[in-house]
Image: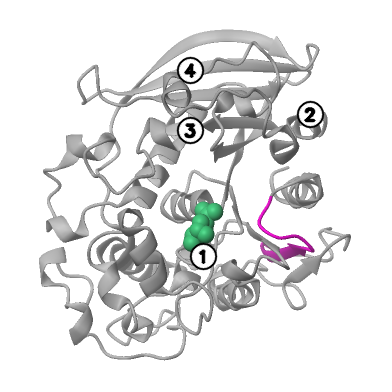
Amino acid sequence: MDHTTSPAEYLAPSALPAQPALPDPLVTFGGGDVETVTDWKQHRRPEIRRAFEHYVYGYAPARPSIDIETKQTTTVLDGRATLTERTIHIAELPADAPSIDLAVFTPATRDTAPVFLGLNNTGNHGVIDDSAVTITDTAAESGLEDRGVASEYWCLEQLIDRGYGLATFHPADIDPDRDDPTDGIRQYYDDLPVPSVAHWGTIATWAWGLQRGVDALSEDRTVETDGIAVIGHSRLGKAALLAGALDERIDLVVPHQSGTGGVTPARDNDQETIAAITEAFPHWFNDVFPAFGGRPERLPVDQHLLVSLVAPRPLMDTEGARDYWTNPGRALDSVRAADPVYELHGETGIVNDGLRSGDDAITPETVGRLLQYRRETAHTLNRGYWDAILDFADIHLS
Ligand code: GCU
C-alpha cells in the first residue's frame, strides 16, 4: 500500500489490510524504515498527514490570505490585562462569508507574552465577567448571553498573573456544530480538488479556523516569538490536536480530555468507538471515516500518529481520571507510542512512564516534551489543570 499517490488512488477502507496493533510511526505505509529526520520530514510526515485527511478528518483548503480588522483595544481585570478584539476576514471569500471574532487578552505589564489560543463554547464574553468584552454576533445568534460563565474554566486572571495571554473565538464563527455542511464556511469551498467524500468535516474546519488565529497571532507584536500554544477541550481538543499536528507554527499543544478523534486511539478503545462517534456526530469527520466503524484495525493510521506529527514540539495530554468516555488509559498508550518520533529528532519525549498526576511536580527533571497529566475529575477544565499546564508551558515556552 502506498499513500504517496493522489487521493483518488487511495484504497477503500474495506480493501485495507487489518493491523491490530498501533501502526509503527517509523515504518512507512510501503513498509520502509524511517531512519532519519529527513526521511520523516520528506516522506513519513506528509504521508501520515494525507492519510488523516483522506481517511479521517478530510482535506481543508490551502492557507488563504486574511484581512485583520481591529475592532477595539481596551483594558480588563483592573488594568492588568489588555483586550484586543479583531475580526479575521478570509480575503478570497465574499464579504458576507463567515469571519472570526478573535478576542486576545495579554498581560498589560509585558511587551510580549506567550499566548494560549483556544476555541470557547460560551462566547468570548464567557471568559470573564466584564462588559468590555463584546458579545459577538455568533454568540448572540447561538443564544449565549451570560458574561463570565466560564471564568473558572479559563482562569484568565491566573494566566495573566503568570505572564500568559489567551486568544479565543467561538467555533460557530467558522462552522456551527451541526450536521449541515451549508451553514458555515464549508459552503464556500465545495470545489476542493479531492473526492467529495474526503472533503473536510467540522473538526478539520475548526482546526483550519485555529490556524487562521495563528495567522493573526503571528502578526501580533505583543505575542512572543515561538510562544503560541493551542488548547481545546473535548471536541474542541480534537480540533486543537489536529491544528497542532498540521501547523508547525504552533509551539505547544494541549489537547484536554480530547478522547476519540483526539489523543485516544480507535484501536482497543472500549469507550467511544468509531461507530459511536460517527453515528452521533457524522459531521465531525469526512465521509470516508464511518466505514471504519466496527473495523478500526483497518485504519492505516491511529491517533498516536497525529500526536507524532506534533514532534518534536511539546504536547501535554491532560485528562480526567474519572472522565471514562475519553479513555485516559488508552490515550496514555497513544502518547507513549509517539515517543520514537521525538527520539528520532534527538529530543526527550517521555520521561519515566510519561504520566504525572494531581500535585506531582512538573519540572525539567520530571517531564519531557510528551506528557499525560491526570487529575481526579470528570469532564471539565479548572484551575488545578491550569497550574500544571502553565508549569509545563514555563518549561517549554521560555
Ligand atoms: C461527546 C462526544 C465526545 C466529545 C464530547 C464533548 O461526549 O462523544 O467525543 O469529546 O461530546 O465534546 O464534550
Query: The disc labelled 4 sits on which kind of residue?
Result: Arg
Look at mark 3 in the image and give the residue it sits on: 170
- Check the image and name the residue furthest to the front: 143
Look at mark 2 in the image and give the residue it sits on: 157
Look at mark 4 in the image and give the residue it sits on: 86
First in sequence, mark 3 or 1: give its number.
3
Extent of the magenta region: 368-380
Determine the CA span between mark 4 and mark 1: 30 Å
Q: Nearer the viewer, residue 360 or 153?
A: 153
Q: Against 262, is 173 above or below?
A: above
First in sequence, mark 2 or 4: give its number.
4
Q: Which of marks 1 and 2 is in front?
A: 2
First in sequence, mark 2 or 3: give its number.
2
| SS class, disc 1 | helix
Look at mark 1 in the image and give the residue it sits on: 307
Q: Which residue is drawn at 50% across and 85% down?
A: 268
